Image (cartoon, rainbow, N blue to C red):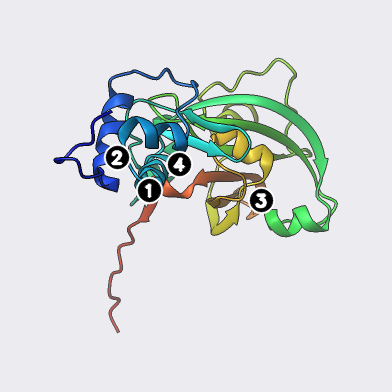
Amino acid sequence: MTKANGGRRPSHEGVYVQLRDRIDSGEFAVGAAFPTEIQLCAELGASRYAVRGALQQLEEEGFLSRRRGAGTTVLRHTPIETFRHAVGSRTDLLNYAHATHMLWDGREGVRADGQLARLLGCDEMREWHCLQGVRHDDQNMPLCIVRVYIDATRATIPADVDFSDDPVYEWLDRNYGIKPVGLSQDIRAKQLTPTEANKLGEPVGVCALQIIRRYFDSNNSIYLISVNTFRSRDFVYNMRLELKETAG
């Protein structure tokens, strides 16, 4: 291929634009293999540095997945839109689930050992129903991995129950009359495990954002806990609090 810019090698930005145009056009199917660095260098007449930089940018933007030994594959044709979860009221906080689509893929009974109890912020040896799945955005791309823990002494989960997109706290309210009165939340960074990375289409060890929410009933007892693991690059959590001065 003839080099652009009067024979000069294309820059990182130039390579990025060319590759982005080809992805946008649908030249490569989602899930298809993408050309290697060596192939792109020969095809575009670009340096290894420029090609590597462009591929890294496309990966960071969510278009490509690059894994050592597995090559580069196309993840999507359209850019990832940052999912912004803004909270300014009790309704905003509890209705987050309605803005996304949930696919459940497993359930089990667990007893909180020391490590799990510390993560959940509950007593050791407490028994829970654990539901697992992946939450998707409006383009059906994986947004976060979800693990929900329901107090096994407070509710029974039938084998044929279908939560679909209904928030679990709403199901518990309808079926057991347990209402969320209070909520605590931890936000922390973590690295994706191989299983988590596979579900989110990310490289192993990439930094992620984990949000742990504990729901309290009218007796101030935790009956429901959710552990949500998000890709940190496309999720923004925003909370607005009204701070009113008190007389005195």
Residue on which disc 4 sits: 94
At label 3, which amino acid type do we have?
Ile
Indicate which disc, 3 or 4, sits on the residue closer to the N terminus: 4
Cα distance between the residues tagged 3 and 4:
16 Å
Which class describes the residues within 10 Å of circle 2: few (<14), some (14-19), or many (20+)? many
Identity, as a three-letter code, of the amino acid under mark 4: Leu
171 left or right of 237 in image: right
User: Residue 49: x, y in percent?
Assistant: 39, 50
Which dot, 4 or 2, sits closer to the camera?
2
Residue 123 visible in the snapshot:
no
- In which quadrant will I find the N terminus? top left
Q: Earlier in the sequence, mark 2 or mark 3?
A: 2
Q: Quadrant of residue 111?
A: top right
Residue at left offset 37%, top offset 56%: 239
Vertical relation: 224 (above or below) 243: above
Tell me what residue is drawn at x 46 percent, y 36 percent: 38
Labelled disc at residue 16: 2
User: Given the current orientation, which residue lies at the most extreme left position?
Assistant: 6
Closest to the camera, between mark 2 and mark 3, is 2
The residue sitting at 56% across, 40% down in the picture is: 179
Residue with the mark numbered 1: 53
Cα–Cα gap, marks 4 and 2: 40 Å
Q: Nearer the viewer, mark 1 or mark 4?
A: 1
What is the number of the mark on residue 222? Answer: 3
Determine whether the residue tagged by mark 1 lies in a helix, strand or loop.
Answer: helix
Report whether residue 229 is seen.
yes
